[in-house]
Amino acid sequence: MNLSAATSAEVNSWVFQIGTCPEEGTPIHAESFWVSVVCEDGTRFDHAVRFPNCVKVEDRDHEFGEYFAHVDVSAKVEALAVRIQEALDAGIALNADLWREGRPVYGSDRYVTSGAEEDQIAFEREEG
C-alpha cells in the first residue's frame, strides 16, 4: 500500500438497498458517501468512515415500529474531504489504519494493470 503517494481527495458514493417498504414491498434505497484519495497512477484508497444518507429509526409509536429517515450528510463528507486534501497539500502522512485500497480510477494506468478492466467487463456481462 503506497498511501503516501496520494495527491488528491475526492468524495465517492454507492447506492444500496437499505430495506423494503412494508406497505408496498418495494425496495428502499440509500446512498453511502466516503472520501477517497487518489495517486497519480490512478490507485485509489477509500477512507474507512462511511456516511449513509438514510438511517433506520426504531419507533414503537410508528405504524410499522420503524421507518427510514433521509439525512443530509453532504456537509460532513465534504468537510472531511477538504481536511484530507489540506493534509495532503501540507505533506502530512495519512493514518494507514483508516484506509484500504479501492477500485482504481477508470482508464488510469493502475486500472489497466490491475485487471480492473476485465473485472468490469465480467460484471457488465453478468448484469446484462
Image: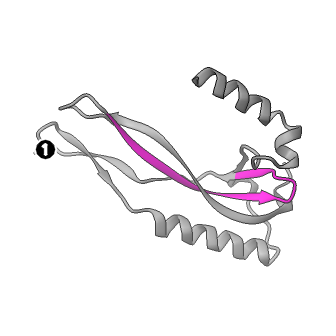
Element under disc 1:
loop
Q: Quadrant of the C terminus?
A: top right
Q: Residue at x 16, y 36 (%)?
A: 64
The image quadrant of residue 30 is top left
| Residue 52 at x, y percent in the picture | 45, 51
Depth check, front residue: 123 or 90? 123
- Looking at the rendering, the stretch of residues picked out in magenta corresponds to 27-45
The image quadrant of residue 21 is top left
Q: Which residue is mark 1?
A: 62
The rendered magenta stretch, by its main secondary structure, is classed as strand
| Residue 28 at x, y percent in the picture | 34, 38
Depth check, front residue: 2 or 10? 10
> Is 15 placed above or below 125 here?
below
Is residue 2 found inside the magenta-colored segment of the image? no
> Is 58 placed above or below 87 here?
above
Depth check, front residue: 118 or 97? 118
Q: How is the image coloured?
A: one colour
Look at label 1 and name its amino acid: His
| Residue 57 at x, y percent in the picture | 27, 47
